[in-house]
Image (cartoon, rainbow, N blue to C red):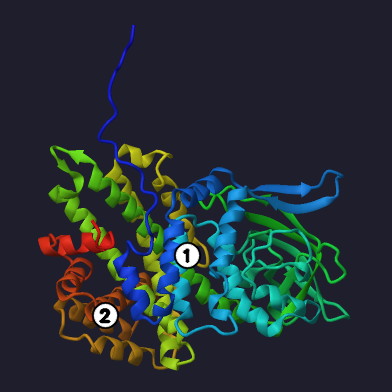
């Protein structure tokens, strides 16, 4: 007998073989507007390649097969290496080929390089986020190392500028490309790095001997790490290579890899320094200052990465809603679903406009006003965008329903990935305190805000009211209001960009949704249509 229980139908196809750049109108416009129009053709090519089913499968494989710690080799000799799935290495090759690790640091870097690099970063985040961790740290550490590489390692300058990914376990000077990691936090302190107990003692040859541990030792396969340790003059920053100048392994012991909620493709470890050799960067006691030189860039990447994950979640939800039929109509045509997806698209429109204004400030940081803008808005962006990502991806799951909750979908991986950007490089309270610190200590920062917001004054009453409320708080800011203040600064910074660059109906809708306590008012039908069309690159 032949039994046929049912026919499979009304099941949407998964999103693959799309162009991640050309399908995002807001991203295309922001890249051109903020000074990287010269990169549009290459970005379109990168977006096409990353949107293929093959690239998306690499992202899945890298997370389904997490790295493995190899503490010893076959002979019993200490190895302290990490083995990755081949998919990881292919993804890393793509990141290096696209210069996401060093585009602004090229010798002939073009104007707008930060903007172009941010777009490439967002595109890669939509395929696989774990590989962006080593890229971010290498990117942030490179300008510091270009200025202050210890004498025995000056031959690293060439591979630091390379576009070749090289995972071989050999001394850095023999490699075609390098990875740089960081080791900051310890068991007893976490973000309170001043409580670090790792000690550094100066040797007669100018190097230091480090004894201690790191609770989170990021990307343990790196060719060198920047490590915080207590020297005679206070907390200091040290360059700790994997191999010593004589070719022997530096005694940095990997104790175990972290078993993380998400970010599964990437290796994070615990480490101990057994008289490990390090070289001082800067002066003793300047460790925090040295790290903060890089901290802004890593925090910017956290916001960019979260935005990329959110963008992918919306794309998956939109693609599903255009195919799935419910109660006689496609989901996208159901009024409640159309309202929900439009609001999600509007949220991302604001984020895109704001983030690329922020990357332009980083591009022009030799201008004091632009540097101040970047210094204030970077921690505000990290706090608010990274926090927004968790409920955003959960909402996208609901669009798909039960299938979105199952591992065959991309969304569970995106959801698990979201919290790391909120926690890494300073959690929410740390970011709020940093915003308050900038407001208190950055000369002329209030004038920068006033000048920026004055240019859009009178265009929207919700924006004007929110700015008046913030000015009241800034007269005597309280630490307990830190998150609220940082949130308002971010929203106003985003609102100013929307009022400048979005169509008036879309800008007004954004201000009403994000700045009006009654923001649940439905979006106008034409605004919905415009947003949904832009979210698919104008082809839906």
Q: In this rendering, would 3 be left or right of 265?
A: left
Q: In this rendering, would 408 be left or right of 188?
A: left
Q: Nearer the viewer, residue 258 or 119?
A: 119
Q: Mark 1 and mark 2 in contact? Answer it, CB < 8 Å.
A: no
Q: In this rendering, would 40 be left or right of 244?
A: left
Furthest residue toward left: 525
Q: CA distance from mark 1 to mark 2?
A: 26 Å
Badge 2 is on which residue?
496
**Who's the residue at 45% across and 75% down the image?**
116
Quadrant containing the N terminus in the rendered view: top left
Q: Above or below — where is 411 with respect to 240?
A: above
Q: Position of residue 339 (x, y in %)?
A: 17, 55
Residue 432 seen: no
Which quadrant holds residue 503? bottom left
Q: In this rendering, would 100 be left or right of 24?
A: right
Q: Position of residue 500 (x, y in %)?
A: 24, 81
Residue 467, numbered circle: none
**Who's the residue at 57% across and 74% down the image?**
102
Residue 427, numbered circle: 1
**Who's the residue at 49% across and 55% down the image?**
128
Which quadrant holds residue 466? bottom left
Which structural element holds mark 2?
helix
Which one is closest to the eye, mark 1 or mark 2?
2
Crowding at dot 2, Cα within 10 Å, few <14 / some 14-19 / many 20+, comes out as many
Give whichever of discs 1 and 2 has the lower sequence position: 1
Q: Position of residue 494 (x, y in %)?
A: 30, 75
């Amino acid at each position: 007998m032949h039994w046929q229980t049912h026919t499979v139908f009304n099941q949407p196809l998964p999103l693959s073989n799309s162009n991640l750049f050309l399908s995002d109108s807001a991203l295309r416009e922001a890249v051109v507007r903020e000074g990287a129009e010269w990169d549009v053709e290459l970005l379109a090519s990168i977006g096409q390649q990353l949107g293929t089913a093959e690239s998306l499968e690499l992202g899945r494989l890298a997370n389904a097969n997490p790295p493995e710690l190899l503490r010893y080799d076959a002979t019993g000799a200490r190895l302290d290496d990490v083995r990755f799935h081949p998919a990881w290495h292919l993804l890393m090759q793509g990141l290096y080929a696209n210069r996401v690790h060093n585009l602004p640091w090229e010798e002939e870097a073009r104007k707008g390089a930060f903007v172009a690099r941010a777009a490439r970063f967002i595109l890669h985040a939509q395929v696989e986020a774990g590989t962006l961790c080593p890229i971010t740290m290498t990117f942030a550490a490179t300008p510091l190392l270009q200025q202050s590489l210890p004498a025995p390692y000056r031959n690293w300058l060439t591979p630091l500028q390379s576009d070749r990914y090289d995972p071989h376990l050999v001394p850095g000077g023999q490699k075609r490309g390098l990875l740089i990691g960081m080791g900051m936090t310890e068991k007893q302190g976490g973000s309170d790095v001043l409580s670090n107990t790792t000690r550094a003692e100066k040797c007669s040859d100018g190097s230091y001997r480090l004894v201690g541990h790191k609770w989170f030792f990021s990307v343990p396969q790196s060719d060198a790490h920047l490590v915080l340790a207590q020297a005679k003059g206070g907390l200091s920053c040290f360059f700790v290579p994997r191999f010593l100048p004589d070719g022997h392994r530096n005694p940095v012991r990997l104790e175990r890899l972290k078993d993380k909620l998400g970010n599964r493709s990437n290796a994070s470890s615990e480490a101990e320094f057994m008289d490990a050799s390090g070289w001082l960067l800067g002066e003793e006691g300047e460790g925090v200052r040295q790290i903060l030189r890089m901290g802004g860039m890593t925090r910017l990447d956290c916001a960019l990465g979260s935005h990329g994950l959110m963008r992918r979640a919306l794309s998956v939800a939109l693609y599903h809603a255009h195919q799935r039929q419910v109660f006689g109509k496609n989901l996208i045509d159901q009024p409640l679903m159309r309202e929900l997806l439009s609001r999600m698209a509007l949220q991302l429109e604001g984020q895109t406009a704001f983030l690329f204004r922020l990357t332009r400030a980083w591009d022009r940081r030799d201008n004091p006003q632009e540097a101040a803008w970047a210094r204030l808005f970077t921690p505000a962006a990290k706090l608010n965008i990274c926090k927004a990502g968790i409920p955003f991806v959960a909402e996208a799951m609901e669009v798909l329903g039960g299938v979105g909750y199952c591992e065959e979908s991309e969304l569970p991986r995106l959801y698990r990935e979201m919290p790391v950007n909120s926690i890494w490089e300073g959690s929410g309270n740390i970011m709020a305190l940093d915003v308050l610190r900038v407001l208190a200590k950055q000369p002329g920062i209030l004038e920068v805000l006033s000048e920026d917001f004055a240019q859009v004054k009178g265009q929207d009453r919700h924006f004007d009211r929110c700015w008046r409320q913030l000015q009241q708080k800034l007269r005597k800011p309280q630490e307990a209001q830190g998150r609220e203040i940082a949130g308002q600064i971010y929203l106003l910074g985003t609102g100013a960009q929307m009022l400048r660059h979005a169509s008036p109906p879309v800008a007004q809708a954004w201000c009403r949704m994000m700045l009006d306590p009654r923001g649940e008012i439905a979006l106008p039908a034409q605004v919905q249509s415009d947003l949904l069309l832009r979210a698919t690159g104008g082809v839906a």
